[in-house]
Image: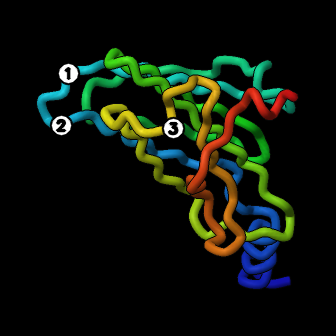
Amino acid sequence: MNRTLAIIAALAAIGSQGRAQTLVLNGHIKGSGPKDRSVSVVNLYSFEGDLHESVLQRHTSVRGDSHFRFELTLNNGYIIEVISSNGSHKRVVVNTELMPHQKLDRSTCEVSIDIADDDKWGRDPEDVAWINYNPTTSCFGLSDTFWSTAALTD
């Protein structure tokens, strides 16, 4: 086999197995404006099966309008928890499961969490939003609805 064919064969083998193994989650903590001096702690937990048996993986502190970034391994479960000094407490469950037949067009996901808005989501710490794979867009994204984790354990 000549050198060119060997390189093409190697690239084909990598391409068939080489889809991204991580999801980069870029988060934006949206405060009340440029003068917002609230401090938010962003915790990343991992879990297998039961959300209530999660393990802290990483945490960071941000001030006001800020950004955070986590690299998440595919086919795992995560919880992102934001606790702000203004009293806001919001959680997002991230399901990075990707079936073998599903393709991933983007290995990044953008999420914005508004700590200044006293919307329905976040009044109860058991309320969570969800990020999961959307087969229509072939990307991960934030769902339009939220659920109570208390209902998931009943």
Residue type of the residue flagged with mark 1: Arg
Q: Indicate the position of residue 121 as horizontal and vertical percent values.
A: 51, 38
Can you identify the residue that label 2 sits on? 33
Label 1: element kind: loop
Q: Is residue 23 left or right of residue 66?
A: right
Residue 61 in sight here: no
Task: Count every numbered label the image shows and give the total.
Answer: 3
Q: Is residue 110 left or right of residue 96?
A: left
Label 2: element kind: loop
Residue type of the residue flagged with mark 2: Gly
Residue type of the residue flagged with mark 3: Trp
- Residue beneath the point at 14% across and 35% down: 34
First in sequence: mark 2 or mark 3? 2
| 77 to 3, vertically: above or below | above
| 55 to 152, vertically: above or below | above
Residue found at the far left of this picture: 35
Compute the Cα span from label 3 to label 1: 22 Å
Q: Indicate the position of residue 148 as horizontal and vertical percent values.
A: 68, 34
First in sequence: mark 3 or mark 1? 1
Dividing the picture into quadrants, the one containing residue 58 is top right
Nearest-to-viewer mark from 2 and 3:
3
Q: Indicate the position of residue 84 as horizontal and vertical percent values.
A: 38, 20
Compute the Cα span from label 2 to label 3: 20 Å
Dot 1 crowding, Cα within 10 Å, few <14, some 14–19, many 20+: some
Can you identify the residue that label 3 sits on? 121
Instruction: Using the image as rendered, state which of residue 73 and residue 5 is in the foreground.
Output: 73
- Residue beneath the point at 86% across and 64% down: 100
Q: Indicate the position of residue 85 as horizontal and vertical percent values.
A: 34, 15
Nearest-to-viewer mark from 3 and 1:
3
